[in-house]
Image: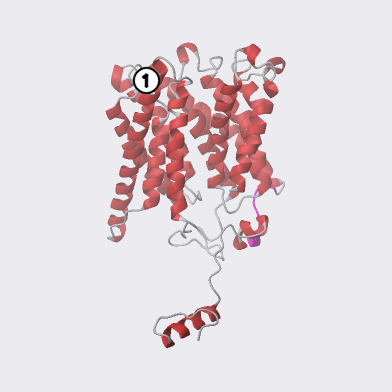
């Protein structure tokens, strides 16, 4: 929880100091901020921007950073969280945002990408960063190998501390998506209000379809493997999130029935991506990479297929697909070139992974002074005394002072 908070705090500082200016300030097609343009929000209104837009764009930058936190949970040092969130929001993400959204980047004019609310620009950036971090950091102790470093026949499962909080978090994210997708109209007046409500509908349909397709595909795979019918809540929740990510590139211009198709395929993509990581022995504690990177990649492609104005399946024209594939390659190339050496540097200086003993004890205890949950049960002697009283009093428990 603290690390997610630090992602938001580091993101706010990094995007304020450099990120917003790099993304939307005056400069080259690659990087803004020329002559200090909008760095630290200097002269922001003189450049035609507003504090409201900074706040909205900061939320996207912080989202890209928080995606990484779940993937590297339970074995990543505090220093690393703050370092990567600052670097990601102040430099790495702003370059991608400038390329696709500023109107001054490489994807402007005739080469405009279709990524309305950030399947590629936000979610692929965060998801691919998480993938690089997971590979360099390595899996949690006992996940794929035993104490003697021998491969396990089946990967060890680490059950969640609270399924109730998982489902609550999923609903919170779902509702929050109505701020991202409909909110990306950037206004609620005139025709924008109609577009915003349309985005809410397609967003809902895609999430619902992703939830159902992911759960039933996982159920079918489990049945073929073990003969057991299991409706896995985790696959349902992450499938819904995958559907949300998948529709994010074109919620404004995807037909409602097409948004269901996008969601169904997003659920399949999530399940396939999750199983692929396990096969490759890449440990993602919360499956953030399949949800955000793989489903984000599919979302960018889906936008170029189903967009009513330029989609291949809707217009027969392939130029939008070509441009969106270019965006995918740009994100993978840029994030890979910047974040790989950055995480390797953190690992080299000893700032990336905690010691094995600290990991086994748990970071709540080793780093934060105590467990996040009070899991201590009642004293054994008190339970024995209670059972004794119940047995002798026919179920009645006497109060203190009573015979």
**Position of residue 84 measured from the top left corner of the image (x, y, whole percent):** 64, 39
Question: Residue under circle 1?
Answer: 194
159 or 396, which lies in front? 396
322 or 20, which lies in front? 20
* Image position of 97 with respect to 356: above or below: above
User: As drawn, is 298 to the left or to the right of 124?
Assistant: left
Q: How many marks?
A: 1
User: At 42% from the left edge and 30% from the top edge, which residue is drawn?
Assistant: 248
User: At 52% from the left edge and 20% from the top edge, which residue is drawn?
Assistant: 101
Which residue of the protein is positioned furthest toward the front in this rendering? 402
User: As drawn, is 225 to the left or to the right of 371?
Assistant: left
Residue 39 on the magenta span: no
* Image position of 38 with respect to 179: above or below: above
Q: Main secondary structure of the magenta part?
A: loop
User: As drawn, is 142 to the left or to the right of 164?
Assistant: right
**Position of residue 27 measured from the top left corner of the image (x, y, whole percent):** 64, 15
User: At 61% from the left edge and 59% from the top edge, which residue is drawn?
Assistant: 359
Q: Is residue 251 visible?
A: no
**Position of residue 316 measured from the top left corner of the image (x, y, whole percent):** 29, 17
Quarter where residue 368 is shown: bottom right
Magenta residues?
Answer: 351-358
Say few, some or many: other residues with alpha carbon within 10 Å of mark 1 (under 14 / 14 to 19 / 20 or more). some
168 or 305, which lies in front? 168
**Position of residue 363 measured from the top left corner of the image (x, y, whole percent):** 62, 56
User: At 58% from the left edge and 27% from the top edge, which residue is drawn?
Assistant: 55
């Amino acid at each position: 929880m603290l690390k997610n908070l630090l992602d938001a705090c580091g993101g706010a500082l990094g995007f304020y100091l450099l990120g917003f200016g790099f993304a939307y300030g005056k400069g080259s097609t690659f990087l803004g901020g020329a002559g200090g343009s909008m760095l630290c929000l200097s002269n922001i209104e003189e450049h035609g921007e507003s504090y409201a837009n900074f706040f909205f764009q900061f939320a996207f930058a912080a989202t890209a950073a928080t995606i990484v936190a779940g993937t590297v949970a339970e074995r990543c040092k505090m220093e690393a969280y703050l370092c990567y969130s600052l670097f990601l929001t102040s430099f790495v993400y702003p370059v991608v945002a400038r390329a696709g959204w500023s109107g001054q980047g490489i994807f402007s004019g005739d080469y405009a990408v279709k990524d309305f609310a950030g399947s590629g620009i936000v979610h692929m950036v965060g998801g691919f960063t998480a993938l690089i971090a997971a590979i360099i950091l390595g899996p949690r102790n006992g996940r794929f190998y035993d104490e003697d470093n021998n491969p396990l026949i089946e990967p060890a499962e680490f059950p969640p501390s609270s399924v109730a909080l998982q489902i609550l978090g999923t609903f919170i994210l779902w509702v929050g998506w109505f701020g991202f997708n409909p909110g990306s109209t950037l206004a609620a007046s005139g025709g924008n209000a109609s577009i915003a409500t349309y985005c809410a509908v397609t967003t809902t349909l895609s999430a619902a379809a992703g939830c159902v397709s992911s759960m039933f595909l996982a159920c079918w795979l489990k049945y073929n493997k073990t003969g057991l019918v299991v409706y896995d809540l985790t696959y349902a929740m992450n499938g819904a999130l995958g559907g949300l990510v998948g529709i994010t590139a074109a919620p404004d211009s995807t037909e409602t029935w097409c948004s269901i198709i996008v969601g169904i395929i997003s659920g399949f993509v999530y399940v396939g991506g999750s199983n692929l990581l396990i096969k490759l022995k890449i440990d993602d504690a919360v499956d953030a990479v399949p949800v955000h990177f793989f489903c984000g990649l599919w979302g960018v492609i889906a936008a170029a297929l189903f967009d009513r104005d330029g989609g291949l399946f809707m217009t027969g024209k392939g130029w939008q697909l070509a441009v969106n594939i270019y965006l995918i390659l740009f994100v993978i190339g840029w994030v890979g070139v910047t974040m790989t050496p950055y995480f390797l540097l953190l690992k080299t200086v000893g700032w990336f992974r905690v010691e094995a003993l600290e990991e086994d004890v748990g970071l709540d205890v080793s780093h934060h002074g105590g467990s996040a949950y009070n899991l201590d049960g009642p004293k054994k002697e008190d339970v024995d005394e209670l059972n004794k009283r119940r047995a002798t009093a026919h179920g009645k428990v006497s109060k203190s002072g009573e015979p």
